[in-house]
Image (cartoon, grey):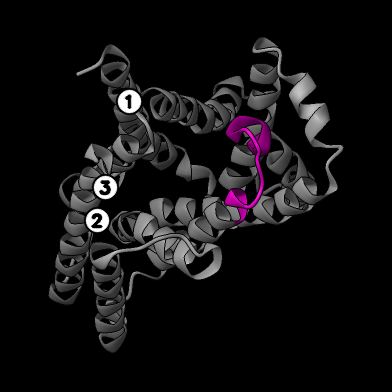
Amino acid sequence: MKKNTFFGILYGASGSLWWGTLGVLYFKSASFVGPIELVVHRTIWTAFTLIITTSIFSKWTNFFSLIKKSKEIIYLFVTGFLIFCNWSTWIYAVATNKLIDASFGYFIMPILSVFFGIIFLKEPYNKQKITSILLVLISVLYLLFNFASVPWTGLIVAITWSTYSLLRKKISVESDIGLLVESLFITPLALFIFYIISIDGNYYFSFTNPKTAFWLFLAGPMTVIPLFLFLKGVDLAGLGTSGMIFFLTPTCQFLLGFFYYNEYFDFNKLIGFIIIWIAVTIYLHDLSREKNT
């Protein structure tokens, strides 16, 4: 194994494990403020953290070059609100003990992205990709027939992120600079929401309570650090390897939800997950084959 690939796997695995474990544990512990205020702070402090990293890595030239491009800015305006919906849904899932449902979304998300790529970007496909897509469809349809078992939060997470990824593929933007622009777009909305909830005094963030304020500020680094780790992994190990490593995220989320938080998991949902896991296995085998050709 090449040295770059080895370190790429370490970086990618660190980012994926962070999303799947540390991220879950942090947002779960911060959920006492409620999902609405928590997504507000995630938005604001992600923008703040990215402003710092952009300064540290001297990327302001890239930023100002990007905001002069009207096409990219329009796309990033739309993807900004998609990621806000994605964050809101995921945080709601964590706060309301629906982590297993959220993991369902992360399991199907890469396969759904492949489907969108085939339909909208005319990307190449093969039997393995089509089979994995069909199995995802079968799983979702099965759960729809057993309506009480439908992981709605997971489906919203998967659809919003896959649509986000599709639109991002249409423009050439560095992930961190793009996320900075997106977070700046949605920060005014976050501030407005915070203003609304503060009218009744129904909020937790206050500089008079530095411990809670600092804990909520960490929502920014908790979003940005795993992103940087995973992107570094992609640079060193490639998309194929990183795509396989990503599945550590939903696996950890599922295991935490099932074993640590004791979330409800009925038989119909088990059947749906088994079908998804088969689809993921086929998808991973195809990724491995493509990586080695």
Looking at the rendering, in which quadrant would you find the N terminus? top left
Q: Tell me the quarter of the picture where residue 16 sits.
A: top left
In the image, is residue 168 part of the stretch drawn in magenta? yes
Question: From where the camera sits, is residue 230 visible?
Answer: yes
Image spot of residue 187 (x, y percent): 74, 42
Residue 174, numbered label? none
In the image, is residue 78 part of the stretch drawn in magenta? no
- Alpha-carbon span between mark 2 and mark 1: 22 Å
Contact (Cβ within 8 Å) of mark 2 with mark 3: yes
Image spot of residue 259 (x, y percent): 15, 47
Image point (75%, 39%), residue name: 184
Q: Which residue is mark 3?
A: 287
Q: Which residue is mark 2?
A: 283
Please tell me which residue lies in front, 190 or 75. Answer: 75
- Alpha-carbon span between mark 2 and mark 3: 6 Å
* Mark 2 / mark 1, whichever is N-terminal: 1
The label nearer to you, 1 versus 3, is 3
Image point (61%, 31%), residue name: 176
Q: Which residue is mark 1?
A: 14
As drawn, 218 above or below 184: above
- Alpha-carbon span between mark 1 and mark 3: 20 Å
Residue range highlighted in magenta: 167-179
Q: Secondary structure at mark 2?
A: helix
Image spot of residue 218 (x, y percent): 53, 26
* Mark 1 / mark 3, whichever is N-terminal: 1
